[in-house]
Image (spheres, rainbow, N blue to C red):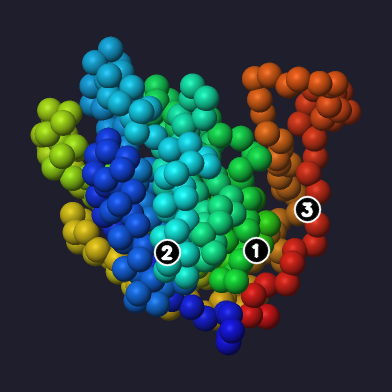
Amino acid sequence: MGDQSKFKAAAVQAAPVFLDREASVAKACALIEEAGRHGARLIALPEVFIPGGPYWAWHLPMAEGRRFSAELFHHSVEIPSDTTMRLGEAARTAGAYVAIGINERSGKTLYNTLLYFDPAGRIIGKHRKFRPTGPEKLVWGDGDGSTHKVYDTEVGKLGGLICAEHTMALPGYTLAAMGEQVHIASWLGFSSSDVSLAEICSRYHAIAYNTFVVASQLVVGDDVLEKLGIGADRQPTLAWSAIIEGGTGRVLAGPLGPDEEGIVYGEIDLNSLIPAYFLMETTGHYWPKQFSVHFDDRELKPLTIGPPVDDGPAGNGPREVRFAPPAPLVGE
């Protein structure tokens, strides 16, 4: 199959069809297939692309916003489902790994989820956002450690975080400690902080953890403003999508304009990361050994049927997770 350390990545910057699952899926599949035709072997689509973000939680009283939350519930995605089959088929047609943000429906709860497919169209994993930001807690539930992983793929060890998770120190650090080489930075189409939040956090991740970053951010369409009855001054479009070099934080490709829809393409060479390992490898020789992280990778459930599980010395505390030696890195 040739040199697996070099490949083309694609960061999609686009608006979904707001609160319309079927139309958003159709648009996502078209974008995936377009990126595949341009030779992309890794394709990232933005946070909750299907079918958009809960902007009402930021701008409307809860009593008024719940009707939009209910509409979102009906248009969210179960895993697996016909929707994930369609997305998987698009990944297979493109012959690429795909990461796409969705509103995941599980039981009576919605999660902000980053869903991963392999080039055969199979689901290889998902990451649920650990903690919804600000008023998003009125819409999404919390993720847990069971979906926080790095995946061994033909394009390197692949991981990702969603939006403001990049402002938390430990999620990114633990991905790096798992050996992450390529990172998906998935962003919503606005910021409650400075307009450069996505750029700053995405480039920092590339520098601090010696990973390439594929940053993909949502565009806020006019249909959002019209449906919610809010003005552009209250919900500005601030998209920033790019391909970022690991170790240096240099922008290799992009960004597009802040309200522009399109696809950013960039070449990734995993071997180019190696020189940076000898400068600031924060989970290796540049790790200050006075500090270490204990990570709870259990799936946390409201109900467990069966005998109790011993989850620690006291039977009720988080257990220490010891990582096996990392698998060989692609291209080395």
Secondary structure category for the residue under label 1 = strand
Mark 3: amino acid: Phe
Mark 1: amino acid: Asp
| Residue indicated by mark 2 | 43
- Counting from the top left corner in percent of width and height, residue 192 is at 30, 38
Q: Is residue 33 above or below residue 19?
A: below
Q: Which mark is residue 323?
A: 3
Q: What residue occupies the far front of the structure in this picture?
A: 82
- Counting from the top left corner in percent of width and height, residue 179 is at 66, 62
Mark 3 or mark 1, which is nearer to you? 1
Secondary structure category for the residue under label 2 = strand
Q: Residue at x 42, y 45 (%)?
A: 83
- Counting from the top left corner in percent of width and height, residue 169 is at 56, 46
| Residue indicated by mark 1 | 152
> Which of the 4 quarters of the picture holds residue 285?
bottom right
Q: Residue at x 61, y 66 (%)?
A: 153
Q: Nearer the viewer, residue 320 or 41?
A: 41
Q: Is residue 31 above or below residue 78?
A: below
Image quarter in which the N terminus is found: bottom right
Secondary structure category for the residue under label 3 = loop
Neighbours of disc 3 within 10 Å: few (<14), some (14-19), many (20+) = few
Mark 3 or 1, nearer chain start: 1
> Which of the 4 quarters of the picture holds residue 178?
bottom right
